[in-house]
């Protein structure tokens, strides 16, 4: 096979995270004859948000402990009523099966003293969070390859190929030699994660984000341009994370009973959600932290000194040994001992995510978007708070639909036009240092997100963001890129700006306040269930994005 | 600089480069890993975990240190 040849797959998976791996495994199980290809931006055994490790499956309906109905009730609270119960039901129903499959492959689910899985509460209601250990991503990658899926590493996808109204494939950038490679397929799954580099972190370090910084909304930009719809972009999420380190810990700390205290030592969540305290919906917790800071009662911190030492050991093993081992070094450098010291938290930058928020591609119960043959899963799919288990559940569901359909090759793919356009773009990016440097470009739009899109929101500020960044959409095609890596970063930055603008459009459209801090409109301070208890859908129109309330 | 490589114990196997999820690392002409794109590092620690000789130390980007 020559590099320039167009490659054919029956099922093309864009992104080798947990959703993509599970989709590949399931497709090969059901239809071994299918040619399944995963295009992976990094190296599959360590790629994406789950690449280093994950310490829990956040949402599993474990028989005898919870029910699917309870899971949906919890999500109703978490999402303030704005979610599609069809997909969440699929996740609830499949989640325990996923746990058992992972366990069978060697992922560890430690048992408590009673011999059962350790299931904790993180949601405002119900227990769905199962402790997990072991090298999840390495195991998934191994099983994926063993199942017979072809993995193409270091190939970020930069464009989709259409076949009339249907999907026809994708074009990837080969990071080794900088060529564009076309892959044709009648079924394409977009699962490249969420969008981490939207707001600017307090530190000003562009890649110092809460969510995986190498996932920047590429699936959303490409899916939207191909004709799929987006939703949940007004849910501009921010988490409470360890100051400056800005990652991992929040759910681990909360589920094991850590308290949030302000600078006066008060357990301040009493003021904002006395019933649920730290387990309040994320937007409520975020607003509480902001309010405490604003009132001069900061800094806010997590404390652990009231916990049983064994529980602190468990927290440390979850965060240090599994999820982010570098956090151990970070705490050591700062002289922080969880048994003794508070861990100062700040609100992270604004990010958008399907699995840790509401944003994503709109799809049916099988993950299919409104473009026939184009699917979404994981953090790229609007599967509110679907987390890691949701990614794998929906990857499985997509594969079942693809295997059952067995569509033939695309008849009239627009490959040539796509490649021609991409080559033209490459020429613009590589013709010298004529345009705005990538770093300045990214810093600027993300600073503007902090100023105009992050809450508190208002029509004036949101419109200002759209006006200020309109010119950047033109400038972005002249950002210089000296090598394939930088060209990949340019595509990431373009996707980031696209997502930030969609967040502004959606935030402008929803003329009410909802989701605690995340969609606080100072010009529409009240929640308006009568008019707005519905999703906002964004679709590409001839003159720009068309926004509408979801028609039930 | 976010990482330090112990050049004495590094055997040049390239595991850190191969697995880096951010495509941050590369091998130099003398067969040693280095941070080719240091601004893109997420200090995730994959390089450290993958190193068979335990010669990678994460020292964190200056702005977050």
Image (tube, rainbow, N blue to C red):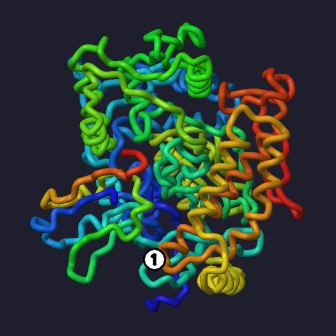
- In this view, the residue farthest toward the left is B8
Hey, which quadrant is residue A72 in on the image? top right
Q: Residue at x 85, y 59 (%)?
A: A544
Assign the N terminus of chain A to one quadrant of the image.
bottom left
Q: Residue at x 50, y 82 (%)?
A: A178
> Relative to residue A341, is residue A226 depicted above or below?
below
Residue nearest the viewer, comparing A84 with A233: A233
Q: Is residue A335 above or below residue A126?
A: below
x and y percent of residue A96 in the render?
Answer: 41, 35
* Residue A275 spot, x, y in % from top left: 55, 8
Residue A72 appears in the figure: no
Asked if A210 appears above or below B40 in the picture, the reply is above
Q: Is residue A185 found left or right of A344 in the rendered image?
A: right
Q: Which residue is mark 1?
A: A175
Q: Report x, y in % for residue A254.
A: 42, 23
Instruction: Specify the quadrant that holds the C terminus of chain A.
Output: top right
């Amino acid at each position: 096979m020559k590099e320039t040849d167009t490659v054919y797959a029956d099922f093309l998976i864009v992104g080798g995270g947990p959703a993509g791996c599970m989709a590949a495994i399931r497709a090969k199980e059901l239809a071994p004859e299918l040619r399944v290809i995963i295009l992976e931006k990094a190296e599959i055994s360590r790629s994406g948000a789950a690449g280093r490790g994950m310490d829990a499956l956040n949402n599993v309906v474990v028989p005898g402990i919870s029910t699917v109905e309870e899971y949906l009730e919890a999500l109703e609270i978490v999402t303030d009523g704005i979610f599609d119960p069809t997909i969440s039901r699929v996740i609830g129903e499949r989640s325990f099966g996923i746990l058992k499959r992972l366990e069978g492959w060697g992922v560890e689910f430690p048992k408590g003293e009673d011999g059962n899985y350790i299931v904790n509460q993180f949601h405002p209601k119900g227990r769905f969070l199962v402790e997990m250990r072991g090298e999840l991503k390495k195991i998934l990658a191994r099983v994926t390859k063993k199942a017979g899926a072809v993995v193409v590493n270091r190939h970020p996808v930069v464009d989709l190929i259409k076949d009339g109204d249907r999907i026809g494939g994708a074009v990837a950038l080969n990071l080794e030699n900088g060529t564009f490679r076309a892959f044709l397929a009648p079924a394409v799954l977009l699962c490249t994660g969420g969008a981490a580099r939207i707001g600017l972190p307090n530190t000003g370090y562009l890649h110092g984000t809460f969510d995986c910084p190498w996932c920047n909304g590429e699936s959303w930009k490409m899916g939207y341009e191909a004709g799929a719809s987006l939703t949940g972009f007004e849910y501009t999420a921010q988490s409470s994370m360890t100051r400056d380190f800005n990652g991992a810990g929040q759910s681990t700390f909360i589920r094991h009973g850590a308290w949030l205290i302000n600078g006066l030592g008060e357990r301040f969540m009493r003021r904002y959600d006395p019933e649920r305290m730290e387990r309040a919906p994320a937007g409520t917790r975020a607003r509480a932290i902001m309010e405490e800071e604003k009132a001069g009662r900061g800094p806010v911190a997590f404390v652990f000194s009231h916990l049983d030492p064994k529980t602190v050991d468990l927290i440390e093993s979850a965060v240090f040994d599994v999820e982010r081992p570098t956090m151990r070094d970070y705490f050591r450098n700062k002289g922080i001992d969880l048994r003794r010291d508070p861990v100062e938290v700040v609100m992270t930058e604004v990010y958008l995510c399907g699995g840790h928020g509401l944003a994503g591609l709109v799809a049916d119960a099988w993950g299919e978007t409104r473009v026939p043959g184009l699917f979404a899963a994981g953090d790229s799919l609007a599967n509110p708070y679907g987390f890691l288990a949701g990614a794998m559940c929906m990857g499985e569901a997509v594969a079942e639909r693809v295997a059952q359909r067995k569509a033939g090759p695309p008849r009239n793919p627009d490959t040539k036009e796509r490649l021609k356009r991409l080559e033209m773009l490459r020429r613009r990016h590589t013709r010298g240092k004529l345009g705005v440097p990538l770093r300045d470009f990214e810093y600027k739009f993300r600073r503007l997100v902090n100023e105009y899109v992050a809450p508190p929101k208002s029509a004036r500020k949101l419109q200002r963001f759209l006006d200020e960044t309109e010119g950047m959409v033109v400038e972005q095609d002249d950002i210089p890129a000296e090598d394939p890596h930088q060209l990949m970063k340019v595509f990431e930055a373009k996707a980031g700006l696209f997502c930030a603008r969609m967040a502004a459009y959606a935030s402008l459209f929803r003329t009410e306040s909802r989701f605690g801090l995340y969609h606080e409109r100072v010009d529409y301070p009240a929640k308006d269930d009568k008019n707005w208890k519905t999703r906002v859908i964004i679709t590409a129109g001839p003159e720009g994005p068309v926004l509408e309330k979801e028609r039930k | 600089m976010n990482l330090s490589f112990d050049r004495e114990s590094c055997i040049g196997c390239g595991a850190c480069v191969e697995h880096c999820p951010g495509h941050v690392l590369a091998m130099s002409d003398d067969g040693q890993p280095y941070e080719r794109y240091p601004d893109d590092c997420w200090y995730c620690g994959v390089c450290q975990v993958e190193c068979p000789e335990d010669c990678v130390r994460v020292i964190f980007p200056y702005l977050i240190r």
